[in-house]
Image (cartoon, rainbow, N blue to C red):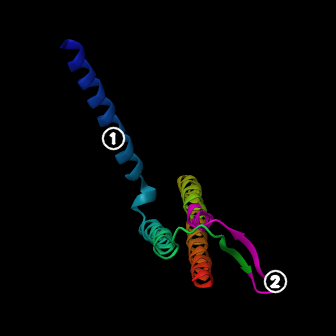
Amino acid sequence: MIGESSKNISSKAVSVSLKKKVRSFFAEDFFRSHIVRWLALFIGAANLANWAALGIFIQPVDLPIIIHYNVYFGVDMLGDWKNLFLMPAIGLFLFLVNLSLSLYFYQRRERIASYLLLIATLMIQLSLIVASASMIIINY
């Protein structure tokens, strides 16, 4: 009985500590900036839209589908339908890396570099949406 209550107390302490750490992370000056909030919101929405569009329009098939199309040479890569989901995954990875780099530069008082990283990430996300849309159009 005593062992169980000490486990509950320690697990509650760990969860409270984790909650405090997460709250303090998002309470930083970086996340209070309106520019950072709006850019992160647009980047997240673009990445989510990319996942949703591919999830809706790309259906599991046994045949290979077109993965890459070149204007000069035509279709130059075929593959499994799952390979198309690599684009939004790369976009999500780049978002997380650039967000952490942006936080690093923001803490070092390099705010312009921080904003430029987030703007570049938004441009990458929009480019990936265009690429995903062209793959959807080519395949269906």
Residue 34 in picture, x, y percent from top left = 41, 68
Where are the magenta residues, as a range? 70-89
Q: Is residue 29 visible?
A: yes
Relative vertical location of residue 72 with respect to residue 109 in this rendering, above or below: below
Residue 68 in picture, x, y percent from top left = 71, 75
Mark 1 crowd level (few <14, some 14–19, many ≥20, 10 Å Cα): few
Occupied quadrant, residue 16: top left
Q: Disc 2 designates what residue? A: 73
**Direction right: furthest residue:** 73
Residue 20 marker: 1
**Direction top: furthest residue:** 2
Q: Is residue 112 visible?
A: no
Residue 42 in picture, x, y percent from top left = 46, 72
- Of 83 and 63, the residue lying toward us: 63
Relative vertical location of residue 122 with respect to residue 97 in this rendering, above or below: below
Residue placed at 57% from the left, 65% from the top? 85
- Of 13 and 93, the residue lying toward us: 93
Amino acid at dot 1:
Lys
Relative vertical location of residue 40 with respect to residue 93 in this rendering, above or below: below
Q: Is residue 88 found inside the magenta-colored segment of the image?
A: yes
Residue placed at 49% from the left, 73% from the top? 46
